[in-house]
Image (cartoon, rainbow, N blue to C red):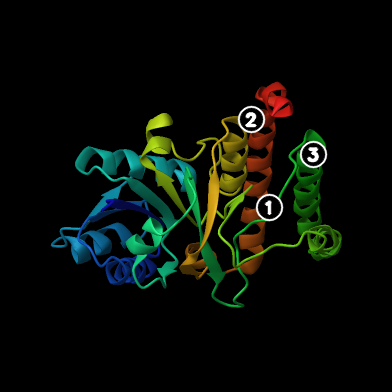
């Protein structure tokens, strides 16, 4: 049987971490698993609380980063930590606001019929039940990236005048028409272009290839899945959507624990999306020739 490792990235909100780990304990019928909780230098007592709660749990190790590394680099930090103490065949990187709803996770992983480098589970948003995998297929280009850079600059500008709802509403209308043209089958095991970043499974071969850097480190928050999608395209790696691996995503719990003010939260989201799109643009331009040959 395969051994599974879990990397849970935590910031501020340790209550979700407890619920996440409880769901892992319930879905893992075998003892061959290990969990590393990476606390991203939370300013509150989340690290101490988590460490005290799981101190006697042989399956859980809680570690604190020296700084807030963000999601991607925090995940990479956790992967390297787990490789020092455990030898997992598959590593699952996830937000702490994830709840596993599969009866026997390892059994379902073994039942997958296609070869893969990455598994994208069947993620549902809790508040409306909408599936988050498979993600819509994107044909990456400089014009696509520049459109989003412009969009988030526009949002940031309009936000100053409390008018950011205008470009946001227009974008939802336009993108809604675009994505509505793509028919997505949520019930079949299939290879996909892009996986939602809140919970992703990586094979040992994938982890070894990138020396533990399973996520591209150039993003602090947002676009992790776009960097991953482009990386997989460049190196012909397969992302397999597994509808049998059912997961609930509470979404935005950590951010909501930081920002009680909705306006400040939106400003933070716009700013970090813009940073990530600029980093993604640099990554795309560095690899443009190779991408266009694929």
Residue 87: image location, x then y, percent: 24, 42
Give the CA separation, mark 1 to mark 2.
Answer: 20 Å
Q: Residue 1 vs residue 219: left or right?
A: left
**What residue is at 71 percent from the left and 50 percent from the top?**
137
Q: Is residue 144 above or below residue 60?
A: above
Which residue is depicted at the point 76% across and 58% down? 159
Label 3 – label 1 distance at C-alpha? 15 Å
> Does residue 187 show up?
yes
Which sits in the foreground, 211 or 47? Answer: 211
N-term mark: 3 or 2 = 3
Residue 241 % position (x, y) = 55, 56
Label 1: which residue? 270
Above-or-below relation of 200 to 123? above
Task: Identify the residue at image location x=62%, y=61%.
Answer: 264
The image quadrant of residue 178 is: bottom right
The quadrant in which the C terminus is found is top right
Q: Could you say which is closer to the camera, residue 113 or residue 132?
A: 113
């Amino acid at each position: 049987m395969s051994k599974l490792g879990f990397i849970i990235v935590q910031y501020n909100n340790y209550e979700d971490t407890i619920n996440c780990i409880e769901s892992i304990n319930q879905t893992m019928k075998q003892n061959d698993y290990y969990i590393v909780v990476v606390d991203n230098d939370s300013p509150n007592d989340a690290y101490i609380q988590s460490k005290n709660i799981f101190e006697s749990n042989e399956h859980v190790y809680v570690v604190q980063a020296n700084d807030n590394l963000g999601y991607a680099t925090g995940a990479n930090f956790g992967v390297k930590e787990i490789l020092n103490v455990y030898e997992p065949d598959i590593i699952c990187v996830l937000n702490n606001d994830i709840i596993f709803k599969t009866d026997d996770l390892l059994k379902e992983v073994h039942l997958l019929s296609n070869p893969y480098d990455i598994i994208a589970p069947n993620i549902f948003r809790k508040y409306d039940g909408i599936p988050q995998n498979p993600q819509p297929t994107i044909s990456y280009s400089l014009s696509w990236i520049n459109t989003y850079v412009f969009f988030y600059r526009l949002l940031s500008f309009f936000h100053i005048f409390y008018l950011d709802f205008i470009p946001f509403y227009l974008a939802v209308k336009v993108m809604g028409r675009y994505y509505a043209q793509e028919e997505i089958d949520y019930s079949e095991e299939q290879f996909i272009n892009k996986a939602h970043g809140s919970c992703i499974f990586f094979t040992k071969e994938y982890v070894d290839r990138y020396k533990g850097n399973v996520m591209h480190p150039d993003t602090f928050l947002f676009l992790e899945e776009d960097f991953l999608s482009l990386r997989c395209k460049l190196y012909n790696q397969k992302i397999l959507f597994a509808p049998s691996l059912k997961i609930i995503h509470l979404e935005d719990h950590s951010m909501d624990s930081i920002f009680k003010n909705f306006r400040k939260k939106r400003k933070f989201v716009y700013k970090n999306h813009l940073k990530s799109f600029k980093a993604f643009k640099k990554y795309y331009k560095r690899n443009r020739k190779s991408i266009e040959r694929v």
